């Protein structure tokens, strides 16, 4: 029953949304809704990258640490350029370029270690997860790296500014999703991701360069992390060893809730977008109600993931 | 091994009117078979005839959908059942040695022999006794492997002998073997034949599946022939000639199955010239040439290196570095490093592992069809309409029978999967096609269709290499045959020399044309 499987996450999203409406009048306020969308965009953008990695049969656990590391690098870079470059806009643009370069490079490292060195993706990214986390802590000397106020004032526009009533992060989320959808579903590269995740041997005998496809998904993931970081840094204007904690789990959860299969071969970008919205909605609703403690946010999210996978498996079995 | 107390003609196991369906497809239709003590029975049939299913039912690895089994228990009482579990079958001395051997690679030889029936002394394993017994069993098979060796480190032939040793530990009195000699060398096969003779004298009933007619004629007392899941008949081995076996198995004269051969003329250019190609792990450099319009067969026993050799021609494996091979494609020297490059150069490879490497079983038909030639349908984005049109064309060209458009490749029958795979590979528009086992496990009608597709390809100026373990197919289809033995090309056969005796002689190393010259070997044409 592929139709129910496709619709499942959407139905869940609507149900959770209705619960939100019932729980608190403030839920439907424009401010709250725009807040939900903006917050879901970090995890959402990272999760779009994760959809590619998982569809092609991989996994990337390093995204949260990578986000923290890139944040740290951007802040250090911008602060240090303040003395040499007058234009703050130029400084920010340079930091944005650097962010994308670091993200792509970090993804490339994950990809090459998995494909060339033939180490399990789980192990490789568990390793780099520790490395990036510890690097950012070291860079901040165990404390917090703060962005200079002169830059922060202008840069904060990226997070707080709006276009047509929607915050910029939402536009970034939407564009990443559209590009991701086209790439995954309408191009040769996307088809190859499905094929590689479905059966590497068949992919090899179909003249697909399996290593290159897999590596490319990690690079894409790295770029998605850097985009998420670019809109995340102005939100707080700081980075520390605590930045981006558990993002990897939330991103993977969003992907799985959305109907992408963890063992690879089947991925859905819109499902992932819905998955990210569901996760953020749950957190938001728990904030707005006294019925369940906000501290139980993680527990509720965990239950949702397990139920989603259980339902998916039922649908597979019927096939 | 216990000798049975029963006389030498008693029935040990009988199958009556056994049918078996997988889903909606019935693969066995009312087959009966009787096994008497001391009998050596061969089961003969084409790929897909239902032989493996039948022996799995006998040994309790599949349950029949209809029909019944009866067996004589250790007291000599006859019991009738509607099917059993493998454990029950083994407890009654009915033991199957699978085609894909079932050994634990990480354990030692003696641990494997006693797996699941470990000998104990008190609470602890009696390792010494198990070792000693394993040694005895192996010695009786003239098998010299160390009982402490890890099974994963041993060659396949040794594993086969360990499987047989294991049945002795299980006190087998009905021993069922699914192609036992497919992976054995000639000498190892001789040891097995001798053992079979000995076991049969002890009163053990032996059933074996084999494609080697020579072997069947030599060691079997009786022959059961299956075709398309039906019993063709039960025969006394000495009443059947090999020609009889083949026509009973195929169900018609061989001539009807294959299209007429249209040999390329001697003026036809060589499109592929390979020399000095040494595949990793094989003995000596190989060389051969393929003419335009030719169907060149590669014959040999399983493991003789045919797939390895031709996969390295297609860029799927890297040849050894010490002696760089020389490959000329359409007269131009090339170095093919990947299958993608081979595809661009006009060479395609169709794998023998249809389910594991050929098709994505859980994906749709169009997805599978266009995967190799996908660039053709793409200008930045994939043109789905064009892709769908090409697929519709292929469905009618290759007569692929589809139940509904949304079905997955895994839901197609074996024959239709093979046609889809052929369509997928040909969509890349190759001029040279290497086909590994073109008709493995498919029905006779589809086989004949595929032979005609291949013949048409050759007639239209394509060049085809067919690797096949099916000797009838090689003889019926190929214009010229290259035979391999232990990673070496031992001979090229043409014309009347393409017959079973000659092919087997080269495939088993009895004959050798000493083809180790580094020059490419040209077809001698009709000179």
Image: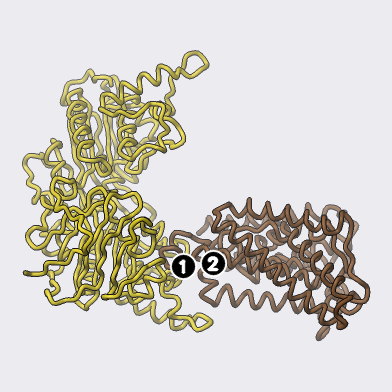
Chain colours: A brown, B yellow
- Residue nearest the observer in this picture, B373 or B389: B373
> Image point 63% across, 61% down: which residue?
A109
Q: Which residue is mark 2?
A: A213
In which image quadrant can residue B470 be found?
bottom left
Q: Which quadrant is the N terminus of chain B positioned in? A: top left
- Residue nearest the observer in this picture, B346 or B110: B346
Disc 1 element: loop
> Image point 90% across, 57% down: which residue?
A290
> Image point 30% across, 38% down: which residue?
B157
Image location of residue A296, percent across then percent down: 83, 52
In which image quadrant can residue B56 be found?
top left
For label 1, count other residues whose C-alpha is less than 10 Å away and answer few (under 14), some (14-19) or many (20+). Answer: many
* Side (left or right) of A191 relative to A239: left
Provide the chain ID for the residue under circle 1.
Answer: A
Query: In the orientation shown, which residue stands out farthest toward the top?
Result: B122
Provide the chain ID for the residue under circle 2.
Answer: A
* Side (left or right) of B378 relative to B26: right
Residues tagged 2 and 1 counted as in contact (Cβ below 8 A): yes
For label 2, count other residues whose C-alpha is less than 10 Å away and answer few (under 14), some (14-19) or many (20+). Answer: many
Image location of residue A192, percent across then percent down: 51, 69
- Residue nearest the observer in this picture, B40 or B473: B473
Position of residue B117 relative to residue B102, above or below, is above
Q: Are marks 2 and 1 on the same chain?
A: yes
Q: Which residue is mark 1?
A: A208
Image location of residue B147, percent across then percent down: 38, 26
Position of residue B236 relative to residue B230, above or below, is above
């Amino acid at each position: 029953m592929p139709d129910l499987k496709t619709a499942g996450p959407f139905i869940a999203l609507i149900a959770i949304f209705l619960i939100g409406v019932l729980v608190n009048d403030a839920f439907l306020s424009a401010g709250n809704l725009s807040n939900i969308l903006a917050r879901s965009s970090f995890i959402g953008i990272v999760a779009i990258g994760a959809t590619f990695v998982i569809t092609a049969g991989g996994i990337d656990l390093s995204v949260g640490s990578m986000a923290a590391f890139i944040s740290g690098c951007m802040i250090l870079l911008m602060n240090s350029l303040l003395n040499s470059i007058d234009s703050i806009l130029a400084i920010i643009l340079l930091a944005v370029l650097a962010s994308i370069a670091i993200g792509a490079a970090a993804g490339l490292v994950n990809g090459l270690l998995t494909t060339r060195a033939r180490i399990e993706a789980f192990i490789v990214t568990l390793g780099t997860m520790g490395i990036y986390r510890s690097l950012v802590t070291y860079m901040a000397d165990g404390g917090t790296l703060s962005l200079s106020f002169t830059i922060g004032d202008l840069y904060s526009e990226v997070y707080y500014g709006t276009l047509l009533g929607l915050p910029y992060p939402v536009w970034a989320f939407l564009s990443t999703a559209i590009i991701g959808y086209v790439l995954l579903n309408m191009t040769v590269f996307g088809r190859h991701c499905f094929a590689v995740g479905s059966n590497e041997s068949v992919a090899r005998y179909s003249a697909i360069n399996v290593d290159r496809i897999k590596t490319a998904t990690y690079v894409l993931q790295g770029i998605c992390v850097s985009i998420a970081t670019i809109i995340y840094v102005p939100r707080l204007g700081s980075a520390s060893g605590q930045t981006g904690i558990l993002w990897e789990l939330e991103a993977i959860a969003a992907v799985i809730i959305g109907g992408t299969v963890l063992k690879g071969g089947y991925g859905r970008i819109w499902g992932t977008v819905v998955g990210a919205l569901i996760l953020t909605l749950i957190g938001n609703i728990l904030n707005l109600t006294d019925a369940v403690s906000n501290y139980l946010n993680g527990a509720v999210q965990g239950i949702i993931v397990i139920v989603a996978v259980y339902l998916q498996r039922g649908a597979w079995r019927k096939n | 091994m216990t000798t049975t107390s029963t006389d030498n003609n008693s029935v040990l196991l009988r199958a009556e009117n056994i049918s078996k369906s997988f889903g909606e497809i019935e693969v066995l239709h009312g087959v009966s078979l009787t096994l008497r003590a001391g009998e050596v029975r061969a089961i003969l049939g084409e790929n897909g005839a239902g032989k493996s299913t039948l022996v799995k039912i006998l040994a309790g690895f599949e349950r029949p959908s209809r029909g019944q089994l009866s067996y004589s228990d250790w007291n000599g009482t006859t019991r009738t059942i509607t099917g059993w579990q493998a454990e029950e079958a083994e407890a009654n001395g009915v033991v199957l040695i699978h085609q894909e051997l079932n050994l634990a690679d990480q354990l030692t030889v003696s641990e494997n022999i006693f797996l699941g029936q470990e000998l104990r002394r008190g609470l602890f394993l009696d390792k010494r006794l198990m070792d000693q017994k394993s040694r005895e069993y192996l010695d009786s098979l003239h098998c010299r492997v160390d009982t402490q060796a890890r099974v994963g480190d041993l060659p396949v032939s040794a594993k086969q002998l360990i499987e047989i040793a294991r049945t002795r530990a299980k006190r087998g009195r009905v021993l069922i073997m699914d192609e036992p000699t497919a992976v054995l060398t000639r000498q190892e096969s001789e040891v097995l034949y001798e053992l079979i003779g000995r076991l049969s004298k002890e009163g053990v009933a032996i059933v074996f599946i084999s494609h080697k007619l020579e072997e069947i004629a030599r060691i079997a007392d009786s022959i059961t022939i299956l075709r398309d899941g039906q019993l063709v008949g039960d025969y006394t081995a000495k009443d059947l000639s090999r020609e009889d076996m083949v026509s009973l198995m195929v169900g018609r004269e061989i001539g009807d199955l294959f299209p007429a051969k249209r040999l390329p003329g001697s003026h036809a250019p060589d499109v592929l010239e390979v020399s000095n190609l040494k595949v990793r792990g094989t003995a000596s450099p190989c060389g051969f040439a393929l003419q335009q319009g030719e169907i060149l067969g590669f014959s040999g026993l399983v493991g003789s290196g045919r797939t390895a050799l031709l996969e390295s021609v297609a860029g799927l494996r890297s040849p050894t570095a010490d002696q760089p091979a020389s490959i000329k494609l359409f007269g131009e020297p090339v170095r093919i490093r990947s299958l993608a490059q081979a595809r661009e150069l006009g060479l395609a490879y169709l794998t023998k592992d249809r389910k594991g490497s050929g098709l994505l079983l859980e994906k749709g038909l169009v997805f599978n069809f266009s995967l190799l030639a996908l660039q053709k349908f793409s200008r930045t984005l994939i043109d789905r309409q064009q892709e769908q049109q090409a697929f519709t064309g292929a469905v009618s060209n290759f007569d692929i029978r589809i139940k509904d458009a949304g079905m997955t490749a895994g839901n197609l029958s074996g024959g239709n999967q093979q046609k889809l795979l052929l369509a997928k590979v040909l969509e890349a528009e190759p001029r040279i096609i290497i086909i590994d086992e073109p008709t493995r496990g498919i029905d006779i009608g589809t086989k004949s269709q595929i032979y005609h597709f291949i013949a048409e390809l050759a007639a239209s100026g394509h060049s085809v290499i067919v690797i096949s373990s099916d000797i009838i197919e090689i003889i019926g289809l190929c214009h010229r045959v290259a035979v391999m033995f232990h990673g070496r090309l031992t001979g090229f056969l043409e014309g009347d020399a393409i017959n079973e005796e000659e092919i087997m002689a080269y495939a088993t190393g009895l004959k050798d044309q000493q083809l180790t010259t580094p020059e490419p070997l040209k077809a001698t044409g009709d000179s």
